[in-house]
Image: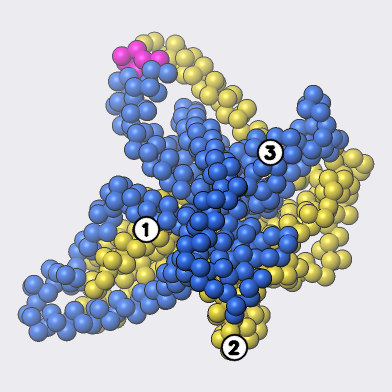
Chain colours: A blue, B yellow
């Protein structure tokens, strides 16, 4: 299957030797990756499923835990926090996507491709800043922006806001803003490069036909962006669903901003009472692992998966 | 269409999007302006420094004994992670691009799926893997400088971050290798050069820009990483800059945020320097990371 064209051309004995040697070379090149992937992806996937069927916690210790089957999942179904947390998570993902990761990203991509090239590039670079800034520093800036009067930037220049720390008053505004400003750059880059690759003929033709800017966006640019839009939406849905670092640093889930992934993290690895419920936390995470794994497989099937994993174009010698 | 008319129309056509862009971009820039002003003032009301400009906030550099240990850990983490990601994914990328071996397609499919898979959901289980590694003698907790590769060591955090970045790295590297012509390598292999020498001496130098891009990306993410060091190193004061800064933020009221801002700027400087010189590379990684190849 592997060394196709080479083996058919060479004599069969020669081909066999080559096949074995290329198999072992391939193995040596792959071995560090294989070890790490097994250690930090496959084994953890097995552990987390096993863990979710135990009552392992600080209270039971590492020796006295028991297998409790699907009890943790039953607990999720009946837990009073389940439905509010799920709704919160859906709201968070949908709103960040709509307003920022797709909405704002599209607006910035359109704007930066309609100004001189150099200027467009500079603006896109600035929008990349939140993504490359260490998250703790980035959120420190937001915390100071929202801080109480007279220190906070917003309270200083907009006195009608009331003067108190703004995060407890409008936690979701800040959660969406902080996540959205980071998230927007991903879509922005992809949309902008898609817009720039629209053949100039199409753009010019629309001008000759007397299109105004809006009509050009509606009938020429947006249809060309159908595929990138779908890609960004699906891809970012998954990453928003499972990421919680920004919320963790900004509010730590206070003021009703605890999303599903953060709930799991709090239960298992970080809470104030020091009782780490690894079993229950794992069960909460498994829900996301399953959604994540299914979504990842579906994306890869959907986004021309087979083209990406083709055999090497030309073969050895 | 008359030429003069066109330029006027063009100018009006770019003035509107330009203004809108400036307005939209201001909120992004303000935080950075604040951090710059704040580090050199005793305190700030909004963006206005109170009192004379001062270097007082930077005294942590010589007065806080912990800062250099934390900085060293951050350097170890980001450099270690960068070298690891680049080397290991270059090896794997080469094999996936150039060598036909059984299981190649399976591994490539897995890499792609793992790339889309949200690895942060596995943190709880990775905690147990690290605790298990910590029990291995020497390897677990007995290595000088990085402490070992188990739970509560810098080495362990390096290993986790490296592993979680591999699917992206391998995919990018395979893309870079796919774009290199076969002729030179074929000549080398016919002359009896091993795959390993062909990889290191012939192909790697050709894809140097790609390697640089992945290295920069990896360094920046390692330098700023918070969640994994915070979760797997228990003592915040022997952790990395990001975790240390978070600890400071928790204890500080906005009145004296200037001292925290100085530590923040201290951590931000290397990232900004990298960024100014390499935005184009980074832009490619952020989009290329999703599409495969540059």
Q: Position of residue A190 (x, y in %)?
A: 42, 41
Say which chain tag 2 marks: B
Residue B98 vs residue A107: left or right? left
Say which chain tag 3 marks: A
Residue A308 or B211: which is nearer the viewer?
A: A308
Residue at horizontal 51 percent and vertical 51 percent from the top = A77
Q: Which mark is residue A171?
A: 3
Q: Is residue B169 magenta?
A: no
Q: Which mark is residue B138?
A: 2
Residue A94 or B185: which is nearer the viewer?
A: A94
Label 1 sits on residue: B113
Residue at horizontal 38 percent and vertical 50 percent from the top = A295
Q: Which mark is in front, 2 or 3?
A: 3
| Dot 3: element | helix
Q: Position of residue A225 (x, y in %)?
A: 36, 33
Residue at horizontal 57 percent and vertical 61 percent from the top = A281
What is the CA distance from the residue labelled 2 to the residue labelled 3? 46 Å
């Amino acid at each position: 299957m592997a060394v196709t064209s080479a083996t058919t051309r060479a004599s069969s004995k020669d081909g066999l030797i080559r096949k074995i040697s290329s198999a072992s070379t391939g193995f040596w090149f792959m071995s560090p990756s294989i070890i790490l992937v097994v250690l930090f992806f496959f084994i953890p996937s097995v552990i987390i499923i096993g863990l979710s069927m135990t009552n392992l916690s600080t209270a039971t210790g590492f020796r006295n835990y028991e297998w409790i089957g699907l009890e943790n999942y039953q607990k999720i179904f009946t837990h009073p926090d389940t439905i509010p947390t799920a709704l919160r998570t859906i709201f968070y993902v949908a709103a960040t996507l709509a307003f920022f990761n797709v909405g704002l990203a599209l607006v910035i991509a359109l704007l930066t491709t309609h100004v001189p090239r150099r200027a467009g590039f500079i603006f896109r670079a600035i929008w990349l800043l939140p993504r490359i800034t260490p998250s703790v520093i980035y959120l420190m800036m937001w915390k100071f922006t929202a801080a109480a009067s007279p220190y906070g930037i917003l309270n200083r220049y907009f006195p009608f806001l009331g003067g108190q720390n703004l995060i407890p008053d409008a936690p979701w505004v800040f959660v969406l803003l902080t996540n959205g400003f980071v998230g927007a750059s991903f879509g922005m880059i992809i949309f902008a490069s898609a817009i720039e690759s629209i053949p100039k003929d199409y753009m010019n033709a629309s001008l000759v036909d007397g299109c105004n800017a809006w009509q050009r966006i509606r009938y020429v640019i947006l249809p060309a962006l159908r595929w990138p839009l779908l890609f960004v939406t699906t891809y970012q849905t998954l990453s928003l669903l499972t990421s919680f670092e920004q919320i963790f640093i900004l509010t730590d889930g206070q003021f009703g901003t605890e999303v599903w992934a953060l709930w799991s993290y709090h239960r298992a690895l970080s809470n104030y009472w020091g009782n780490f419920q690894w079993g229950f936390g794992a069960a909460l995470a498994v829900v996301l692992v399953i959604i994540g794994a299914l979504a990842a497989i579906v994306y890869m099937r959907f986004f021309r998966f087979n083209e990406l994993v083709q055999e090497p174009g030309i073969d050895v010698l | 269409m008359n030429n003069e008319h066109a330029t006027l129309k063009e100018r009006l056509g770019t003035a509107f999007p330009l203004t809108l862009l400036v307005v939209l971009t201001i909120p992004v820039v303000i935080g950075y302006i604040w951090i710059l002003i704040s580090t050199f003032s005793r305190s700030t009301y909004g963006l206005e420094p109170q009192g004379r400009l001062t270097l007082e906030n930077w005294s942590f550099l010589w007065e806080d004994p912990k800062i250099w240990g934390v900085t060293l850990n951050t350097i170890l983490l980001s450099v270690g992670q960068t070298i690891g990601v680049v080397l290991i994914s270059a090896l794997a990328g080469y094999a996936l691009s150039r060598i036909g071996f059984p299981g190649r397609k399976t591994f490539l499919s897995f890499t792609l799926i793992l790339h889309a898979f949200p690895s942060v959901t596995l943190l709880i289980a990775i905690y147990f893997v690290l605790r298990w590694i910590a029990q291995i003698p020497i390897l677990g907790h007995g290595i000088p400088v990085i402490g070992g590769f188990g739970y509560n060591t810098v080495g362990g955090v390096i290993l986790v971050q490296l592993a979680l970045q591999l699917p992206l790295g391998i995919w990018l590297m395979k893309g870079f290798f796919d774009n290199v012509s076969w002729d030179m390598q074929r000549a080398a292999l016919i002359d009896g050069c091993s795959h390993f020498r062909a990889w290191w001496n012939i192909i790697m130098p050709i894809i140097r820009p790609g390697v640089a891009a992945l290295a920069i990306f990896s360094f920046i993410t390692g330098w700023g990483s918070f969640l994994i060091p915070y979760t797997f190193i228990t003592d915040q004061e022997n952790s990395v800059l990001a975790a240390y800064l978070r600890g400071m933020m928790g204890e500080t009221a906005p009145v004296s945020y200037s001292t925290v801002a100085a530590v923040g700027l201290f951590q931000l400087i290397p990232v900004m320097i990298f960024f100014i010189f390499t935005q184009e590379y980074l832009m490619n990684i952020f989009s290329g990371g999703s599409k495969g190849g540059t």
